Amino acid sequence: MIRNWLFTAIRGFRKNKTATAINIFGLTVGLSSCLLIALFIHHELSYDDFERKGDRIVRVIMEYRFDGGGEIQRGNFTSTKVATTFKRVFPEIESAVRMTDRGRIVSYRDKLFSENRFFFADSSFFDAFSMPLLKGDARVALSGPMKVILTESTARRYFGSEEPIGKILRVGTDSSNYEVTGVMADCPSNSQFKFDLLASFSSMYENQDDVYWDANYTTFLLLRDKSDLAPLQSKVTAFMKKEMKGQGAMVDFMLEPFWRIHLYSEFGGFEPGTSIVYIYILAGVALLILVIACSTYINLSTARSVDRAREVGVRKVIGAGRGQLFWQFIGESFLLCLAAVLLSLGLVALVLPAFNRLADRQLPWSSLFSGPFLLLSLLTVLLVSLLAGSYPALVLSRFHPVKVLKGAFKNTRSGQGLRQSLIVFQFVISVFLIVSTFIMGQQLSYIRHKKLGYDRDHVLELPMNRSLLPNFDYLKAEFLRNPDIISMTHCASSPVSIYGGYNMRNSTMPSNQQLAVYADPIDPDFIKTTGVQLIAGQNITDQDMRNADPKDTLTKPEFAFILNETAARELGWTPQEAVGKRMFMDDSRPGVVKGVVKDFNFQSLHIPVKGLILFTESRANKLLVRITGEHLPQTLAFLETKWKAMVPAIPYEIHFLDENYNKLYASEQRLGTVMNLFSGIAIVLACLGLFGLSSYAAKQRVKEIGIRKVLGASLGHLAMLLSAGFVRLALVAILIAVPLAAWAMHRWLQDFVYRTTMEWWVFTLAAMLVLGITLATVSIQAVKTALLNPVKNLKVE
């Protein structure tokens, strides 16, 4: 029996090659898209699943506000005091880990690398996190200063086949000697920690435990029991109220579950997170693509019901029961889906490297052939077979043999209604995805081209540290000898991303009333190099720099400040009033306001502009170079040659400022690119289904077309006749999809403080695009049918 069903199914596939090809292609592409999205979603949802104690780990979030007023500030930073104090005070805490990532220059013999993934952590790191050492003793590997653990790939990079344990690496500009005390496997791709070197926290000169304000570190707590979280949070809040009483500020700490950080936290970790909203969007797109593929199968199967009516009639006459016919057609659906799944597995394995580059992930192709994914594929075959095959099977098995064999059978109104409904649904999905893609693209374009208040074009960023400051003027003079280099400046943070937290007050405010503010130490060329707009007062000078760092130890430092408009307003001044006013930053930096700059976006566009101070201090991590943009290869070659000759201790690593800016929106850019890809796939699948249906519609009306042509109907009239019904369905879909897309995109845009507007032409363009695609797809079949010889058409039975 099964063999007979199989032969019958194959014979039917060969007889209807066009429909079979459309169905297999549509299901293959749809399932491949779903598998790729499923791999990505699985990877994101599996973040840190390997952490055996993950449900007991929390991250500490700092929350503070000075008594002077202002908004409550929050961030994923703490001082070093938090870990030691909380571990001592709260018995619910089993262990505490302080961590930070600080780029370091590392050398071994003649090898020199700028290590951007250089982390510091307490020795308790291995108590909380499940990253065992391959070599070395985890109990002592990070105990004591100047110890470092390498990942396997890093150890090979420095030592090749040599034994790394006990070797000495020179770290930092002062070439401190760090002993290699351990080797661990490379960090998993689904881990929040992706370091290459992990050094002992006690190696850092900043290590202090006496204040809550030196908040530049990340603190993790390992609880004794996961149920301790809520009670501990209450205790922490009560404890901090006592700690900060009379201190002129409110400081509290929120405990954030470790497993929420990657997908749910508003604060980034050691790597950018992925919003759970984007996971829902991608899951929705995958489901919509699968629905379109299934809808195409159902439509083509029910449209072919006339062709198969006589087959069903003959089978019933010779004794086939309705159940047998039903499972015959379900079996055909199963065979098609099984073939599509097998093809899609091969297709996914083929395109996965390109998709990894697109999604900026390392999704292993071996996951496709793991137990869970093979089970998922089998369940998908069964589910799609039932979803796509049940209705056609029910329709076909219900035919009355007497009517069918007399030739009186026609497509039922219910079948036509279902096909029309599915076509409308496919078009709704297509219009929705087109509008969403357009608006996402508009927002990303708005982000890329928004005037931020500074000029990020033609600005290069190079690494720098304190060791370069004594020779900075000489270095600058040598660089400026090139006519294509306009200016050069140093700063702690580039204008793309300033997150240094400080406090400020004016001279009339008591010392216990402070306002939270961001700040960045700069030199006199910062404004010229970055293009920040000075709207009141004047720029800082070389003398201001000397006043802030006097060589005479008896002279007290005097700072010069440049405020942004928001900082001036928070201190109670207009830009003009602020100039010349005396103020204090962190109370340890007294000085005078030299000028006020126009507000500029120095953080993500998800965040409104906050108060900012640019101040005089000889501290630098970044070197910014403005160039003309002409003779770019020669300019870069000149910079590289000069850098290697004059700064041999720091590897030459250059980035364009606009590239660093775009990295802030990597998640949105990935989503936009992926949406473009899968929206295109959805539209192609919808067109495939429309193409197949239009061919059957034309086939069923072949006699009518022949008669109309004999009576003088034009080719254009016949094409419009066959297209009109599909165009009406497309118009209905547009009326449904446009409000849905407008609502969804409005919700998405709310996540951006600075956002584009939804223009009417986007919806019009999407509607015109869908109507154009519909007309083009249907007209191909209509014209093809209309061009047939009407005499032959009228002879068709």
Image (cartoon, grey):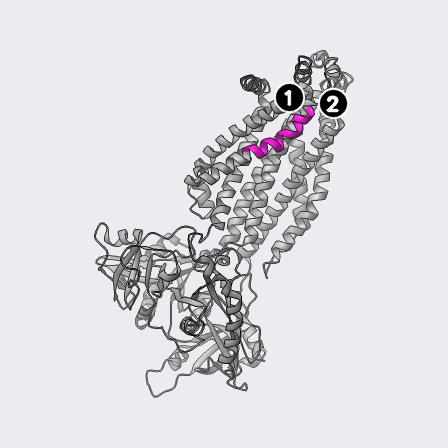
Tag 2: amino acid: Ser
Tag 1: amino acid: Leu
Q: Is residue 724 above or below residue 494?
A: above
* Crowd around label 2: few <14 · some 14–19 · many ≥20 (10 Å): few
Q: Is residue 383 magenta?
A: yes
Secondary structure at badge 1 equals helix
Q: Name the one closer to the observer, 336 or 229.
A: 229
Q: Which tag is nearer the camera, tag 2 or tag 1? A: 1
Q: Is residue 406 left or right of residue 20?
A: right
Residue 58 location, x and y as percent? Answer: 47, 63
Secondary structure at badge 2 equals loop
Q: Is residue 754 left or right of residue 41?
A: right
Residue 297 location, x and y as percent? Answer: 62, 30
Identify the residue position indicated by label 2 in the image: 714
Identify the residue position indicated by label 1 in the image: 325
Q: Main secondary structure of the magenta part?
A: helix
